[in-house]
Amino acid sequence: MARTASRFRFAAHTKVAAGVDHRRVLCETRSGGMGRPRALARRRSDVTTSVSRRLEAYQVIKVLLVDDEELVRSGLRMILGTADDIEVVDECADGAQAVEAVRRHRPDVVLLDIRMPGTNGLVALERMRALPDPPRVAVLTTFDVDEYVGQALRLGASGFLLKDTEPNQLVRAVRDLAAGGAVLDPGVASRLLVALAQGQRAAGPARQQLAGLSEREREVLTLLGRGLSNAEIGGALHLSEATVKGYVSSVLGKIGATNRVQAALVAFRAGLVG
């Protein structure tokens, strides 16, 4: 009997040392408790919940490409295809097709050319903005900025991008747009602002809009007017990107602008950028 008890103690000690206390499981099972099985079930449930939350948090940005040149669309699709979190859901060569594609696919972002045969980009933009929960629309343009760009801004465009924008900048722009931001390509900023101002700065009203800004906010607005991103502004002013984001929100609120493009126009008219 003593030898049997000794063997039992040795076996129990070995199993405990291996990380499994079978005596506890046996005891809890006999007493009607679940103990470790319940703990394991809870862990599995926690892991499942965690994975589900991560999948929900990982949302793919749906993009619609609208340009009458197939070569431009193919290039944009190729660039955006390198990003795991971006999906080009459709592409169109006409504004009317684009509006129907927005209804069908409900994209987060639309990259829209203005000059197209048939229904042009301005008409398409106006129709898209009238839809429930409209997408963020960035106008695709070239260095030949004209009066159509100013109209696109008034119709609610969230940004302006050059068709030959660097791949990494294009991907970042799409992400910024999907997050609710606005984008202004530095390469087109000065020409765009000149076109919008139509040769007149209207400095008086614009400077009045700047009256409530701090010195730091004026610096941020100046860099916005040059088309810099939050990260680039942070580098120039030695601020974190989160801090710059706070300054940008404050500037937009104080000058009554709804996006970065409108803020850039105010900076131009006030003479902060030329």
Image (cartoon, grey):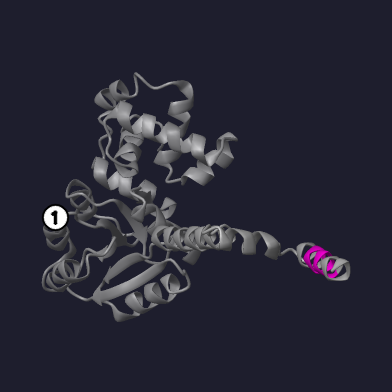
Q: Position of residue 89 (x, y in %)?
A: 29, 73
* In this view, 182 is above or below 70: above
- Report the side of 117 relative to 47 (left or right): left
Is residue 144 found inside the magenta-colored segment of the image? no
Label 1 sits on residue: 132
Q: Where is residue 205 in the image (x, y as percent from the top left)?
A: 24, 24
The residue lying at 38 percent from left, 46 percent from top is: 190
Residue closer to the observer: 123 or 47: 47
* In this view, 207 is above or below 112: above
Label 1 crowd bin: few (<14), some (14–19), many (20+), radius 10 Å? few
Q: Which residue appears farthest toward the top when viewing the image?
A: 211
The residue lying at 20 percent from left, 49 percent from top is: 156
* In this view, 225 is above or below 98: above
Q: Where is residue 195 in the image (x, y as percent from the top left)?
A: 27, 47
Quarter of the image with the C terminus in it: top left
Q: Main secondary structure of the magenta part?
A: helix
Quarter of the view holding residue 263: top left
Q: Where is residue 123 in the image (x, y as percent from the top left)?
A: 12, 61
Amino acid type assigned to the residue bearing label 1 in the image? Pro
Q: Report helix, strand or loop for mark 1.
A: loop
Quarter of the image with the N terminus in it: bottom right
- Magenta stretch in the rendered image: 7-13
- Report the side of 97 relative to 32 (left or right): left
